Image (cartoon, rainbow, N blue to C red):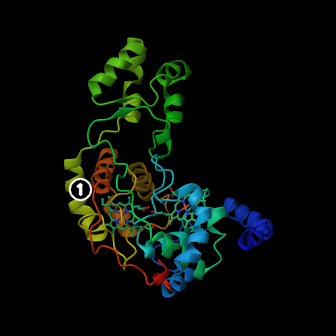
Amino acid sequence: MMRFKAFTQKVGVLFLIGIFFAITPLIGAGANQWGTKVQEALDALKIDGDPIDGEDLYDICAACHLPTAWGDPAGTFPQLAGQHATVLIKQIADIRAGNRDNPTMFPFAIQIEGAQDLADVSAYIQTLEMNPNPITGPGGPSFILSNLRKDVSPYSLDTVEKKVGKEVFKKLKTLEEQEFKTKADFMVKLKSLLTPAELEKNRADILTHADWTTDLNLGKKLYEKNCVECHGDHGQGSYKDYYPVIAGQTYLYLVRQFNWIKIGKRRNANPDMVKQINGFSQLDMRSVVDYAGRFKMQEGDWKKIKVDDDDDF
Ligand code: HEC
Ligand code: HEC
């Protein structure tokens, strides 16, 4: 209640801050903010978090990340359960400081009142178990025209509509969300909907968007060559170095973040990772995160941050 009141009093200020961030998105864009330069994060890491206070704070987070902290299956909201506390603290602090764009969460992230709150909410999240049945990728051929995925690929349905024109798009829309496990089945369906001329003209654009195939063997190869060094041999990340756990994270969230890191939209990304994945194709990207998301965390992967009152837990 207290916090809520404090929040409503701050709304005016928040609004101005919101405008500031809305109109000055380029200020921080040049400077790469990787590393934990945000003082608040450094302070929070020194504090023993209190999961009881953290649980109260988590109420506002649960609206999006869910009470389980498993996020949503479409990957709009990431799973937070199982993430290293250092990563949680760094990411929340980066979001608060405007180093990582998250307009959806920003107004809520700034309700956190400082280092102690940051430590508390992260301590609470650490008490939550990961989703035992995480949402993985297709693990093979997959052809689907999906609007849910417009965020995660440069080839959104809106782009398809512009490319193929209204008439053809209207026919294609009847396929929305239907998944085909082979390209042949997908083509049969397309042939039944479009005239031969329409198909011929738009085939490449449609396939570019609809092809969500992943190749787990390719993913394994790419992972071992390019990711182990930082994210660990089974996606466990690193508490010490702020490398996120990617094992068990929702597939579509991973795809989106990976795309954003590659194109520089996630500004707080590690520059070495950006270099590492520079030559990746869309198939490479989907395959490597489909592979990585299937890893399971193991005993000893976590270093639990010390909490004030673990006796109460
Ligand atoms: C209005 C919805 C919303 C609320 C409320 C919200 N978040 Fe988020 N959060 C998001 C979205 C959306 C993302 C992913 C943004 C992206 O794709 O980059 C996110 C990302 C995160 C991340 C980064 C995860 C990662 O793997 O990098 C953390 C940590 C996080 N949220 C913690 C919190 C905490 C703690 C709270 C409560 C104080 C909270 N969020 C409240 C929407 C929300
Ligand atoms: C040089 C170390 C490094 C390498 C190599 C690297 N990463 Fe990362 N990765 C990071 C760091 C650090 C972050 C978090 C960046 C930040 O602070 O926002 C990250 C973030 C991510 C995220 C977003 C996670 C989240 O919760 O939001 C994904 C997905 C990811 N990496 C996948 C990969 C994959 C797959 C590879 C191999 C192809 C890879 N990374 C290679 C260091 C690395």
* Percent coordinates x, y for residue 157 in the rendering: 50, 34
Amino acid at pointer 1: Leu
Say which residue label 1 marks.
222
Q: Is residue 118 visible?
A: no
* Picture residue at 50% right of the left edge, 36% below the top: 147
Q: Give the camera-side residue of 210 and 8.
A: 8
* Percent coordinates x, y for residue 11 in the rendering: 77, 65
Count of numbered tags: 1
Residue 185's image quarter? top left
Q: Residues within 10 Å of mark 1 (few under 14, many from 20)?
A: many
Q: Is residue 53 shown left or right of residue 304?
A: right
Q: Is residue 14 visible?
A: yes
* Picture residue at 71% right of the left edge, 62% below the top: 18
Name the residue at the front extreme.
312
Secondary structure state at the residue bearing disc 1: helix
Residue 132 to residue 109: above or below: above
Residue 198's image quarter? top left
* Percent coordinates x, y for residue 6 in the rendering: 76, 72
Residue 41 to residue 283: above or below: below
Which quadrant of the figure contains the N terminus? Answer: bottom right
Q: Give the camera-side residue of 253 and 21.
A: 253
Residue at mark 1: C-beta within 8 A of ligand 2? yes
* Percent coordinates x, y for residue 117 in the rendering: 59, 77
Residue 39 to residue 81: above or below: below
* Picture residue at 47% right of the left edge, 57% below the top: 78
Q: Is residue 65 shown left or right of residue 209?
A: right
